[in-house]
Image (spheres, helix red, strand yellow):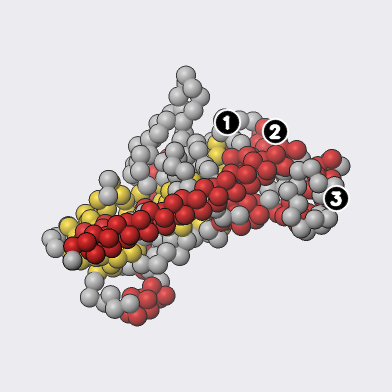
Amino acid sequence: MTLEDLGFSFEMETYIQSAGMSDFSIGRIMAEHKERYIVKSDDGEFESEITGNMRYTASGRYDFPAVGDWVAFSAYDSNAGIIHRILPRKTILERQAIGKHGEKQIIATNIDMAFIIQSVDNNFNINRLERYMSICYASNIEAVLILSKTDLIAHEDIDAIIASLEKRGKKITSILLSNLTKKGYNHLGSYLQKGKTCCLIGSSGVGKSTLINNLAGKDLLKTSEISVSTNKGKHTTSHRELFILETGGILIDTPGMRELGMTDSADGIESTFETITRLSSQCRFNDCSHTTENGCAITEAVAGGKLSNETYDNFLRMQREQQWFETTMAEKRKKDKEFGKMIKSVLKSRKKNKF
């Protein structure tokens, strides 16, 4: 397997030369297991860890490798290596870290396309879809909606789902797919091209692992049925992992995500809610909050039935989350800066007293 099969590009080669990293081997992170990484290169796979300097100088999770990253590493055994540097990331798919205020969690990196998978039998939810779309668009990642398990409901119910998407104004390419009958698989070929990386995101139980197994033609991942007691998917994927298909496409599988908090990028929300973004330019006030002001084009559209209440409510909810995260992140940076100044002051004082 060559680096090109893994998605390596001419731009990366140029960067490696200019950064003086030609003496290192180059590989891509295939999986992560408690800060031990599987790195794949044209010489094979290497179980690797980062250098002590990388760990010491890291200011947060962003400074650690993630699945999809390109890294400069050195092999010291037939299947072991040390990671020295992370190459610049083309795209970063991220969400708000669960339970950690003002912090982000990287889902995967260097992604060309995201498959948002929702099953039509019990998982379809437009509000959640808008969240997935927002995190993709925030990183300039194209998104395609895959409506899976179409063999489990009637045609008229599928038509109703498509109609609900149109009513909410969701302009996203949709593929109707059945992992059982393989209907819809022929539409995936144009996306699964050699060297192109697609990430699968969605809740547990929507068929991500089965889709990868079917595309690979073998059981790469464990699959599980929907829980009868909770009617929710079971977590069969416990970590992120990158797979190379024989047809040339690259797939990144991710654990099911029920929580999807917004980060500090407003661009993704603006792109997801195109109609609202367009209407906002017609508001009387530039700083319109789109809630109680007179002359708000958005609230007028809701009142006139031109914009659905569901779309409007979800937009406000996600916008508040984004603004809250932005404020929390700014406060965290301020505290970190003040703490850094205090440490410098203490060290300076100790040095002065020493003499």
Position of 263 compared to 106: left or right?
A: right
For label 2, the residue is 156
For label 3, the residue is 295
Position of 311 compared to 184: left or right?
A: right
The picture quadrant where one finds residue 118 is: top right
Residue 45 vs residue 63, the one in the foreground? 63
* Any part of residue 250 in sight: no
Identify the element where label 2 is drawn: helix
Circles 1 and 2, Cβ within 8 Å, touching? The answer is no
Q: Residue at x 50, y 38 (%)?
A: 259
Residue 119 vs residue 186, the one in the foreground? 119
Q: How far apart are marks 2 and 3 (CA)?
A: 40 Å
Identify the element where label 3 is drawn: loop
How many badges with numbers are in the image? 3
Q: Where is residue 194 in the image (x, y as percent from the top left)?
A: 43, 63
Q: Tag 1 or tag 3, which sits nearer the N-term?
A: 1
Q: What residue type is labelled 1?
A: Asp
* Any part of residue 229 in sight: yes
Q: Position of residue 282 (x, y in %)?
A: 82, 57
Which quadrant is the C terminus positioned in?
bottom left
Q: What residue type is labelled 2?
A: Glu
Q: Position of residue 45 (x, y in %)?
A: 23, 58
Q: Tag 3 or tag 2, which sits nearer the N-term?
A: 2
Residue 149 vs residue 268, the one in the foreground? 268
For label 1, the residue is 121
Residue 99 versus residue 135 in the image, above or below: above
In this rendering, the label closer to the viewer, 1 or 2: 1
Circles 3 and 1, Cβ within 8 Å, touching? The answer is no
